[in-house]
Image: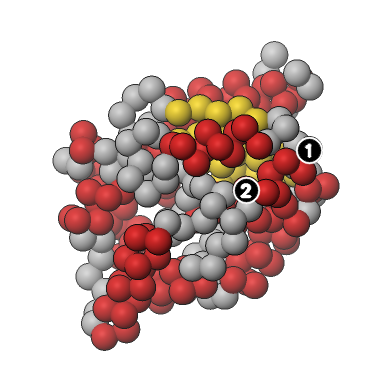
Amino acid sequence: MRPTFPLRLDLLPGTLCDERMWTSLERALGDGYTCHHLPLHLPRTRAGMRELIATHSAPQSHLVGFSLGAYLALEHAVAYPERIASLTLIANSAKGLQPDEIATRQRVIAMLERNTYAGITRQRLRELLHPSHLDDAAITGLIRKMALDLGKEVLIAQFAQTFDRPDLMDRLQDLPFPVLIVGAEGDQLVQAGDLRAMAQRLPHATLHLLAQPSGHMVPLEAPGELAAVMDAFLNRVQSGA
């Protein structure tokens, strides 16, 4: 049974993303939900990012995070489990960043400090998207637009302030609330094996690996399937099942 009132979701986007990345998901979820956007692009420090989540999320939050936002949502949930009604983690590993991704980000920061930011490159899009979506102008155009609008300072801050992502795998077993983990086998940045390992450690986990082709940008590449999975999960949470 669906909730009889709109359910508030607190949404945390990923690196160089804002509320626009959730638009298709919101449309697919429908009017049973109200989406509250946490502007992760505003803080310039890790402490500021943590404070944003603590002050802008609900006292009993249905917290939804994507990529960087998912890691920070998990970090918040580990620190304040009493404030979480449910947690949805999209395209993120509790292990933090892989060494090759850290190296890539270090190179990007060094380059940005010397040059003008020109936006998302075609190579980066290949890393973020499933091949079937590389020529989808609606998806690639939105990613490029968000990156250019948010710009160099946001990218440097988000990269430099979030290299240090402690491995949270050993903390998962202590989380008492329901957790939905969503990922894609085609994600080049997050290993599906990490998501399976997370689900095994969580006492109340639902794992969904997308059936349709998707890379890392799940809310843009598979909003319909993501919405259906989230809706089923949140209805179970609301019903106490």
Question: Image point 27% across, 78% down: which residue?
Answer: 111
| Type of the residue with mark 2 | Met
Q: Which mark is residue 117?
A: none
Q: Residues within 10 Å of mark 1 (few under 14, many from 20)?
A: some
Q: CA distance from mark 1 to mark 2?
A: 15 Å
Q: Nearer the viewer, residue 47 or 162?
A: 162
Quadrant of residue 56 within the rendered picture: bottom right
Q: Does residue 132 sit above or below 189 in this rendering?
A: above
| Type of the residue with mark 1 | Pro
Question: Image point 53% across, 33% down: which residue?
Answer: 196
Q: Which mark is residue 176?
A: 1
> Quarter of the image containing the N terminus?
top right
Q: Nearer the viewer, residue 36 or 73?
A: 73
- The picture places residue 40, in percent across and down from the top left corner, at 54, 61
Q: Which mark is residue 169?
A: 2
- The picture places residue 124, in percent across and down from the top left corner, at 25, 56
How many marks overall? 2
> Quarter of the image containing the C terminus?
top right
Specify whether residue 96 is in view: yes
Q: Secondary structure at mark 2?
A: helix
* Badge 1 vs badge 2, beta-carbon distance below 8 Å: no
